Image (cartoon, rainbow, N blue to C red):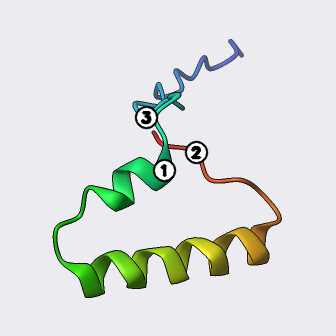
Amino acid sequence: MAEKKTKLAEIKTKPTSASVEEFINAINDEQKRKDCFVLLEMMKKASGEEPIME
């Protein structure tokens, strides 16, 4: 029996050098911006990784 070849989907999002902090600071709504920074810190602590824009 011939082997079945599968084609994997290409990942469409790629890491960039854009700053996560600059992206969040561009949010006009002050409360939303503060909330984003709280979430950013929570995710950094939970994952042990630095954030990357994609």
In the drawing, what numbered circle is on residue 8?
A: none
Q: Along the polypeptide, which appears first: circle 2 or circle 1? A: 1
In the drawing, what numbered circle is on residue 52?
A: 2
Secondary element type, mark 1: helix
Residue sitting nearer the eye, 3 or 24: 24
The answer for how far apart the CA atoms under marks 2 and 1 are is: 7 Å
Q: Position of residue 18 (x, y in %)?
A: 46, 34
The answer for how far apart the CA atoms under marks 3 and 1 are is: 15 Å
Q: Nearer the viewer, mark 2 or mark 1?
A: 1
- The residue pinned by badge 1 equals 20
Q: Along the polypeptide, which appears first: circle 3 or circle 1? A: 3
Q: Along the polypeptide, which appears first: circle 3 or circle 2? A: 3
Q: Which residue lies furthest to the right in this view?
A: 48
36 relative position to 42: left or right: left
Reply above or below: 45 against 23. Answer: below
Question: What residue appears at the point 39 percent right and 82 percent down from the top-left corner?
Answer: 34
- Mark 3: give few (<14), some (14-19) or many (20+) Cα within 10 Å: few
Quarter of the view holding residue 25 = bottom left
Q: Position of residue 19 (x, y in %)?
A: 49, 41
- Are circles 2 and 1 on residues that touch, CB within 8 Å? yes
Secondary element type, mark 2: loop
Q: Which quarter of the rendering shows the C terminus? A: top left
Q: Position of residue 51 (x, y in %)?
A: 62, 53
Q: Nearer the viewer, mark 3 or mark 2?
A: 2
User: Disc 1 residue type?
Assistant: Val
- The residue pinned by badge 3 equals 13
